[in-house]
Image: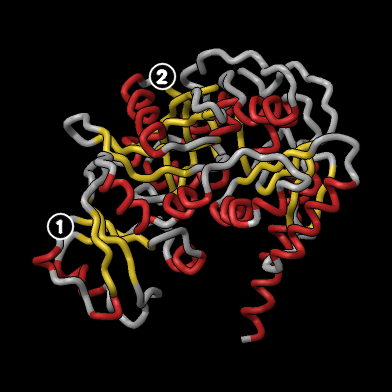
Amino acid sequence: MRKEVQVPVKASGHAIVLGDRDLGAPLHAAGIPVTVVCAPDSPNRFSRYFRASLTDPRPDEDAMVDTLLEDARASPGPVVVYYQSDDDLLFVSRRRKELASRLRFVIADADLVESLVNKTAFNDLARRLGLPVPSTEVVDLSAGAPESRHLSLPALVKPSRREDAWSATFAAKALLVETPTDAEALVDPTFPFRDHVLVQQYIPGPETLIESYHSYIDPTGAVAAEFTGRKLRTFPIALGHSSAVVTTDTADVASLGRSILQTLGVRGVAKVDFKRDPEGRLWLLEVNPRFTLWHRVGAAAGVNIPALVWADLVGRPRPPIRQARAGVGWCRVELDWQAMRESGTGVLDWLRWVARCETKAGVDPSDPVFLATKALSMARSAAHRVLASGRR
C-alpha cells in the first residue's frame, strides 16, 4: 500500500489552513509546518498534521483578519494561507487587500470568484462563454411551483450556492424532480427555500460518472500541475456527498478542464466537475477555485499542488512534479460505510478496499490522537442528544 510520505524540506515560516486534515496532510508530507484555524473544541487541534492552531472567531470577520495578521506578524518567516470551503474562499477573496499586507496566497480574480461560487451567476457566465453546461433556469419558488410545461423533466433542483439550511434539511446535494407532482412539492410549506433555486437539466446516470479535473495555474497562465479523478461512491448513493474517490488518467477530462479554465481566465487552484452522459459527452457542472479534499489524494498520487503553491509563494524551487498515478484512493470511512451498505457492496470487499485505500478522512488509524479525540467528541454529542430528548 502506498503511503502519504514525501521527502521533507526545510521550511522557513508556516502555512495557515482554513480547512481540515485533507488540506493539512499534503503540506505536512512536504515538511511544511501547518497551523489550523478551527473551533476551540475541534479534534483537528490534535491531528498530527498540524503543529499549532488558531481559534476561528467568525462570524466576526474583522476579528478573523486580525487573528491571521497577528499570527503573521509573529512569524519569523513567510506565512501562506490555504482555504478549503466556499465560505473560506469568499472570506480570503473579499478581504484580500488587508490579508495581502502580511500573508501570501494564490486566488482567482475577485469578480470571477463571486461568479463561480454563485451557481446562478456561474450559469450566466458559462452560457455567455459557450461552455458545455446543462440547460438551467432560475426559478422563484415564492411565486408558486414551476409550471411543468416550462420544465424538461427529469430535472435537478439545487440552491444557488452551498447552503447550511439545505444541508440540514436534505442529505443529498440536489433534488430530482421527475414528475409534475414532484414540482408541486417544491412549494410545500416544509420546503426550506422560498426564494430562488436552480432548475437544471438532469444528466442521466450514477454519481460514478462524475469526473473532475484539478489544476494549479501560475500567475503567468501556465499549468504548473494537473491530474484527473472520478467518484467511486457517494452518500446518499444518488446526488450525495463524496465518500470515496480515485485518481484517473483521462485525456478528455484533462483537455476539456484545461480549456475551460483558460476560457474563464482562472489563476491559482481550481477543480472542474463534469458528468459524462450515456453517449460519452462531458457536461460541465461547476468550477471551484479553491483547495479541496482532492489535493490530499493528488499528493499521494505524486502531484502535491499545495506544496507547489508553497514553493512559488515563498520563493523556493518547485518540488518535482510527475504525472499522477491512476487508481490512488481516498475515502471518508464512516460515510463510505453508509454508502457501501446503501449500494449493496459486500462488506469484505469494502473492507479490503478500505485497507488498500491510500488516504483516509474521518476514521483514520494513522492519526490516532485525532481519532481518539473525534471519538470522544462524537460520544459527548450523542450523550447530549439523549439527554435533550429525555427532557422533552
Q: Vertically, is 37 above or below 167?
A: above
Helix, strand or loop status at disc 2: loop
Percent x, y of residue 132: 25, 39
Q: Along the line of sight, which residue is nearer the eye, 337 or 292?
A: 292
Name the spot of residue 267 as percent of width and height, x first.
51, 35
Q: Is residue 326 above or below residue 260?
A: above
| Quarter holding residue 290 | top right
Q: Nearer the viewer, residue 66 or 230?
A: 66
Residue 39 in view here = yes
In this rendering, the answer to whether 39 lies above or below 218 is below
Relative horizontal placement of residue 378, taking residue 132 as reference (left or right): right
* Mark positioned earlier in the residue sequence (1 or 2): 1
Q: Which residue is mark 1?
A: 153
Residue beneath the point at 62% across and 25% down: 304
- Name the residue: 34% across, 83% down: 189
Can residue 352 be seen? no
Residue under circle 2?
249
Q: Position of residue 354 (x, y in %)?
A: 55, 31
Q: Amino acid at mark 2?
A: Asp
